[in-house]
Image: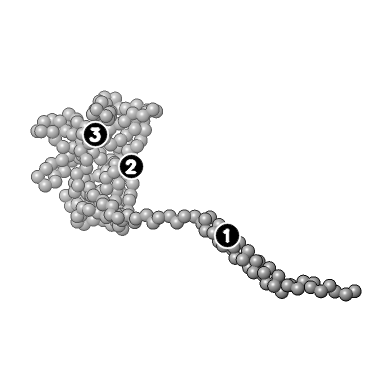
Amino acid sequence: MKKRAGYFPNFKSFMKKMNFFLTVCIFLVSIAIHAQAQTKQPAKKANKPLIKAHRGTIVTDIKQKVSKTAQLKYTAFPKIGTEIVAVPAGAITVGDSINSYYYKAGIYYVQNKTGYVVTLPVAGIRLKGLPIGYRRVPIGDKIYFYYFGTFYRQVENSDNYETIVPPETAVIDGLPNGYIIKKVDGTEYYFLNNTYYAEIGAPAIEGRIGYEVVTIIEAY
């Protein structure tokens, strides 16, 4: 049988075109796969600024590690946060336009749905007289008073006393149970009611250990 003249006369040219076409297709598919993989990658989280806290109060004879015995003075007292079913007999109501407490013998209680919780008051609550066993706390030319986690100031030479924010550098002889320990820049502190207390050597206090109100600064 004779072969017809002109049978696949451009075979080589055809194969070159096919190879080129396949190469282009493979290239386009690889680009598409790479682009799809890129879109599936999780977005990188922005780095948050590092917060470093440090003490803003100059403290002498500070203890790097606390003894965790600040509550010993108030061993017989309830822990802050303890819930009871009824307030002690003779408790009075004190407060301001927003906050209301039951008070007796230096301890404050706030009512909730199921009972009464031992708490520490906000600043600005006034009392007639101070609880028995209070401590005088001198700072510069001012005298403050302290008892069971609460600081007071005298109101205009009267018998009235007002709760205040713990004053910086005040040194006290004990804390109510209910504090936690926080470490800041390598040093441990007692933390109670949003206030930091450093454990320090205090020769004037029984046991020669005191607890100083300090300011902790967070710096970015």
Residue underneath mark 3 = 106
**Where is residue 16 drawn, in percent x and y?**
67, 72
Q: Is residue 147 visible?
A: no
Q: Residue at x 35, y 35 (%)?
A: 82
Which label lies toward us, 3 or 1? 1
Tell me which numbered mark, 1 or 2, is placed earlier along the sequence: 1
For residue 178, the mark is 2
Name the element at disc 1. helix
State the residue position of label 1: 32
**Image point 25% across, 44% down: which residue?**
174
Query: Where does the image place residue 25, in percent across and percent down from the top left?
Result: 63, 64
Dot 3 alpha-carbon crowd within 10 angstroms: few under 14, some 14 to 19, many 20 or more: some
Q: Nearer the viewer, mark 1 or mark 2?
A: 1
Q: Is residue 75 left or right of residue 114?
A: left
Please tell me the numbered disc located at residue 141. none
- The type of residue carrying mark 1 is Ala
Measured Cα–Cα span from mark 1 to mark 2: 61 Å
Q: Residue at x 81, y 74 (%)?
A: 5
Q: In this rendering, does residue 169 appear at all? A: yes
